[in-house]
Amino acid sequence: MTGVVKFSSTLWEFSSMNKWKTVLIALAVAVPSGVLPAAAAQPAAAQPAAAQPATAQPLAAQPATAPIENNETQPVYSRADALTETVFVEVARVDSDSDGRPDRVAVDIMRPKETAAGLKVPVIMEASPYYAGGNDVPNHVVDLDGSDPAGMEYRHNKFSDLRDEMFGLDDSSAARAIAPPFTGYYDNYFVPRGYAVALVENLGSGRATGCPTTGLDNETAGPKAAIEWLNGRARGFDVAGNEIKADWSTGKVGMIGVSYNGTLPNAVAATGVQGLKTIVPIAAISSWYDYYRANGGVLAPGGYQGEDADVLARYVLTRDDAEHACGALIDRIEQDQDRVTGDYSRFWDDRNYLNDVRKVRASVFLVHGLNDWNVKTKQAVQWWNALAERDVPRKIWLHQGAHFNPFSFAQRNAEWLRQLHHWFDFYLYGLRNGIMDEPQADVESGPGQWAQHASWPLPGTRDVRLNLSAGKDGRNGVLSDRRPRGNAVESFVDQNVRAADQLAENVETTDPNRLAYLSDPVTRDVRLSGTPKVSVRAAFQGGHSPYLTALLVDYGSDARAYGSVVYGTTPVCYGQGVPGDTGCARLAQHITVTAPYKIITRGWIDVRNRKSDSRTELLREGGFYDFDVDLQPNDYIVKAGHRIGVVLISTDRDFTLRLPAGTGVSVEPDDSSVTLPLVGGRAALG
C-alpha cells in the first residue's frame, strides 16, 4: 500500500508479556546509491575492441547459399529483406482480466524471407512486459519513523531515470525511433544465420489483454502459449482476426532476456513445455520472495527502496482499459504481499519457480553480475544449484558488472556472441560444434580478469569456519580459526541514517552503531566461491528494528569494480544493418574505484523469523538466540595483505525498512562464526 506501513508497537515479548526491448536489456545499469565508496572513479584499463570497428560499414548480407559451414550457421540470409508480422496468440484457459474471453499476447516476429518459400527455422524468443513502456508509480514509504513521510528520494519507480544511450545497443537514439520494436542485436545477428526472432508482449502490457501479476502462472502462460503456437498447439490471429499458422517454424525455441525478460524464461522452462529447447536467463529471478524479501524481512531491490510486487504490476499495466480490467486484481496483490510481517506465504510460494524445477527440460545458459544488487546473486545461484541437482545441461557466466547484458562488455562481446551462437546452434539446429565440451563456467574474478573453469563453485571449494572473538582494550573484534574462550558480550545500538558502507568504512576505531571483527592480513590471495553464512548469538532489547544485517568486507586498498560502466564513443558492428537499425553498438568497460575497502556481500534476517521465513515469533526482550544468516553468493578474491572482516548492524538503510532508531543488540561473539566457501579450503588461509 502507498503511504505509511503499519507496524507493531513492540517487537519483543517481555518477561510479563516483517520502452521497448532496449529498456530492459541493461535494466538499472546505474549503481545504487551507497554502493560505491567515496573515492575517485576511473575507467578500467582499455581493452581491444571485440567486434568490427564502426569505421567499416555495417556487415552486408551474403548470397543465400547453404547456411551451415564448419558446424556453424552462416549469415547468408538478408536482414533487410526479412519478413515481419504480428500475431495475437490466444492463452487458452487463462482469463486473468475476467472478461469471459481467453487472454491474448502480441507476438512480433521477424524471419528470413525464404521462410515464405518453405524454409523452416527455429525461433529465438524474448518475452517482456516492458515493450510498451510503463506508468509513473510511486514506491512505498520505508521511513517508518516519520522522518520522511513523503518518501522523498526513493519514491520513484526503477525505470524513471534510465537513459537508453547507456545501454550501448545501438549507435544512435534517432535510429531506435525509426524501427521499433526490433532493436537490440538478436535480429541483426541471428536472422541472417537462419533464425526467427519473436518478441512477446506479455499479459496486461501494450497490445496484450489480461493482467500482470508479478510472477504468477498467468504471466508464465503468455510466452508458453506463444511456444505452443509455434508448435501448432495454440491459436494465433492477425490484426483482422484471421487465424494464422506458424508453418515456417521448426517448433524449436530458445528464450533469452535480461531481468524480467530473463525471469520469464525461468518461469516457462519450469512448466516443461514441449518445444522450449534452451533458455538464457540473464540477471533473472528464480523466486520473487527473494527479490522483495529476505529471511522474513521486507527488503528492497538494490537502489529501489519501497518497490514491491504491486508497484511493478502497476508499472507494466499499459494495456487498454487498464484500471477497469486489472485494478481490483492489483489491489489484492498489494494486500496479499504483506509488507508488515515479511513472511513467506502462499502468495510468494505461487511465485517460486524452484518449486517446479523438476519439470525443466530445456538446457540453461545462466548469466549474472556479481555486483548486481537489484536482482541479487542468490536468484541465480539457487536456480543453478537446483538445476545441478537434476543434472540439467547448463553453463554459467559470472561477471563483475551489475544488472547488465554481457553483450555490452567490450572485452567479451566477441566471445559472448561466439558462445551464444554455438549454444543456440547446438540446441536449436542440432549442430555438434563442441560447445558442451568447453568449460562450464566463465568467471570474471576482477575487472577484465576472465577465466574458464570446469564448474561453479570452483573445483576444490570447501567451507571454512572462522570464529568471532571480542575485541580487547577498546578495539574491534577478531576473526580467526582459533576457538574462542570466555563469555564476553558486545553491544551496539541501531540507527537508520548512515548507510552500511559508512558503518563499515572506519575499522581503526570502534563504532556505537555496529560491531566489527577482522582477520589478520592474509598471506596469499584467498578466493571465495559460493555462499558465505554467518551465525550469530544475540539479544535484542528496546526499539523497533527486527533486522540483523551481516556484512562481509574486504579491507585493503585496491582498484575494484562496483558495477558501474563507461561506454566507448566509437560503435562496433556485429551484424547486418538496415536504415534505422545499424547493427552497430557502443560497448562498455568497467569503471574501477580505488578505495580502502569493499563490502563483498551481505545478508539479512528478521530476527522474529529465526526458525522459519514463513513464521513470525516474538522474542523475549534481552534473551539470547541463535540466528543464521545466508549472505548473497559471490566469487571474489581477497588479495594478499588484505583483511577479511565481518560487520554486524541492524538497519541496512539501502535495503531494509527504516524503523525508529534505538534497538539495542548484544552479541556473544564467542558463540558466533562465519563460514566461508574457500577455493582450497582451510589451506587457502596459509
Image: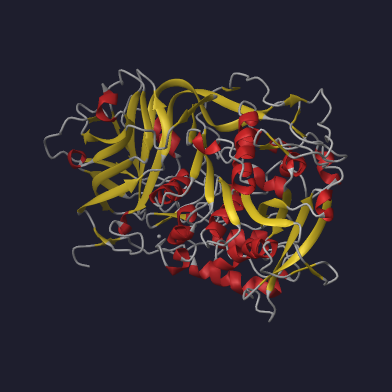
Q: Is residue 597 above or below residue 92?
A: above
Residue at (82% x, 42% y) in the render: 79
Q: Position of residue 462 (x, y in %)?
A: 29, 35
Residue at (71% x, 49% y) in the render: 21
Residue 165 seen in this snapshot: yes
Residue 134 seen in this snapshot: no
Q: Quadrant of the C terminus?
A: top left
Colour scheme in use = secondary structure
Q: Nearer the viewer, residue 81 or 676?
A: 81
Residue at (50% x, 41% y) in the render: 395
Q: Position of residue 569 (x, y in %)?
A: 74, 25
Q: Is residue 185 left or right of residue 147?
A: right
Q: Is residue 490 above or below residue 556?
A: below
Q: Position of residue 636 (x, y in %)?
A: 42, 30
Q: Is residue 538 left or right of residue 381?
A: left
Residue found at the very far bottom of the displayed protein: 100
